[in-house]
Image (cartoon, rainbow, N blue to C red):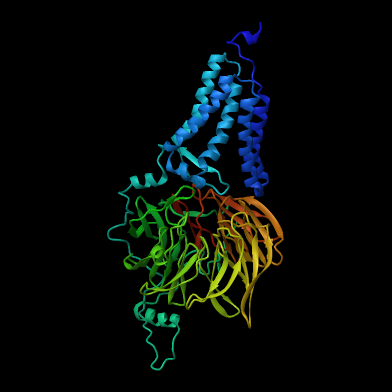
Amino acid sequence: MDTAADPSRPQPLRLWPGIVLAAGQLTLRNAVPYFWPDQLYTAFMGAVACSLLVFVWWVFFSRATRLERFGGIVLMLATFFATRPFLDASVATGMMHMMYPFNAIPMAALILVGASVLFSRLPLTARTTAMAVVMFAAFAGWACLRTEGMLGDAASLLHWRWAKTAEEKLLEQSDGKLAVPAPAEPASVEAAPVASPVPPPAAAPAKSKVEEAKTEAGKAVAHFTPAAWPGFRGPARDGIVAGVKIKTDWSATPPVELWRRGVGPGWSSFAVSGDLLYTQEQRGDDEIVACYNASTGRPVWAHHDPARFWESNAGAGPRGTPTVYNGRVYALGATGIFNALDARTGAVIWSRNAAKDTNTKIPGWGFSSSPLIVDDALVVIATAGKLAAYDLTTGAPRWQGPADGDGYSSPQLVTIHGVEQIVFTASGGAISVAPADGKVLWKFGANNSVRITQPAVIGDGELLMESGEGGPLRRVGVTQGADGWTAQERWNSIGLKPYFNDFVFFEDHVYGFDNGILACIDAKDGKRAWKGGRYGGGQLVLLHDQGLLIVVSEEGELALVKASPDQFTEVAKVPGIEGKTWNHPAMVGDRLWVRNGSEMAAFRLAAEH
């Protein structure tokens, strides 16, 4: 029988081109980034191109009826645009408002090919109806989804829209407030305070602004033993733990979990002083600076501000880490609220709106700076690409640095050729200012890309800095001469390309994450020694005395890796916490604290005697 004369038996579809394109799309999106992670962007855009070619195949080469071909495309386009107003905000705004098209169109292409194969033998009327339903659902179904952000490889964490978030589940346990015991358990901050006023000498020479601030600070602030882990990435903001050695056979002596509890969203790390643990989190409409007992995890106090920052890629909550110093906690929120709080009680000592002080708009990913204490006198933060200094005691503004584009890094205190200075990286490159007045000492211009990680000092006048997403690590040499300061590039290396995952320096080598894989490069010339171990967008610290890296993977696993240029050697790995983990760990003695946007935990690592 002539099938062309029988409308119930349509012409067979030409399926193979669609199948080939769908296979190519899946390969580019999944296999290529796994084997060639440096080609993530190329693979992603190649997969999008394959999906568009699927629609070309369907319209011109599939042998489908005219109604199926053109009617189906019109239906899909109409559904694509009609669905947009009903999308969840997380999907509508994700990936700079491109999450929906960049995910829905490739997924619709795969669904189209799959449905064509599945329904190819149906009678024409049934096939046309089934294809219409599938084409409608391919886009309309996105109105039923939400995302909890992205992973380091740009994969979206999709969930049903009606499923409760981790934050919503946490809020169900209370009224949105952090439940603090009454009375709160006793707090200890390293050591009991001893008042130590520092009056100026009877006949003192003229003081700099920093020296004047030191004197005022001495009159009002009690002096405490320095915190063991005062804030972001430890005492020197370099991720290095000194004076600690642990047993590495975790099959025999695994990390012992001391406690585990839920926490509000946020990418804050910890500050640790005595038996108190400080962090920042979001709970509903309140941004919180929280204090917990470091040994038990029980809340001690919580300071609430009526503020909420949220963006789709990373979610809600503060980005910066508190700094504890001299009996006070200094914390910058994602919307610019800058607080100085009593470390024992959480009482407000002073509070500023840094966004208004610096006339800076909240950047796309929120204010992310962790406060830096300078010379017992100043506390310095970064509002996007601008440094701002405040009086440590009163919170009065002292100086502001020049605007240098956008940035999510934190100020770093360094000494170069005997001169103390504050180094900061932003989209304009690196800038160094004098602590006393914020005067620019030197600048190093680089590609205009957002920077997140901390610069690292690897020698007197030698610094390492990132180049932004996907860019090379750079070594910069800084010198001082008769004409002032100069900074010039020594080398740049694609052997290690940090993004938001910080790196550490140890014995002339640099260890960090290169597109989700741990890598080691030689600091002398930037040549890669090895690359291995897939930890995603994780973080790490270095046990300096042992030459050992403690890696927290993006999935919350804990791993031990040798800090040796010889080869990649993973010594041990165990489960840690669950969920996307971008937060930096903190470690004091044999205790390790880790957290993410939904839970935090403390572990004791067996000490090596």
Is residue 194 among what the camera can see? yes
The residue depicted at 71 percent of the width and 65 percent of the height is 525
Pick the quarter of the image with the C terminus: bottom right
Query: How many labels sit on residues?
Result: 0
Spot occupied by residue 173 in the image (x, y as percentages of width and height): 33, 46
Q: Is residue 544 above or below residue 24?
A: below
Q: Is residue 132 above or below residue 523?
A: above
Pick the quarter of the image with the N terminus: top right
In this picture, residue 139 sits left or right of residue 512 = left
The residue depicted at 38 percent of the width and 59 percent of the height is 290
Spot occupied by residue 5 in the image (x, y as percentages of width and height): 62, 8
Name the one closer to the observer, 574 or 536.
Answer: 536
Name the one closer to the observer, 177 or 559.
Answer: 177
Specify the quadrant of the image occupied by residue 192. Answer: bottom left
In this picture, residue 522 sits left or right of residue 160 = right
Name the one closer to the observer, 434 or 587.
Answer: 434
Specify the quadrant of the image occupied by residue 494. Answer: bottom right
Spot occupied by residue 151 in the image (x, y as percentages of width and height): 54, 47
Is residue 227 among what the camera can see? no
Q: Is residue 446 above or below residue 264?
A: below
Name the one closer to the observer, 539 or 434.
Answer: 434
In this picture, residue 66 sits left or right of residue 213 = right
Spot occupied by residue 472 in the image (x, y as percentages of width and height): 65, 59
Q: Which residue extends farthest left?
A: 182
Q: Which residue extends farthest top?
A: 1
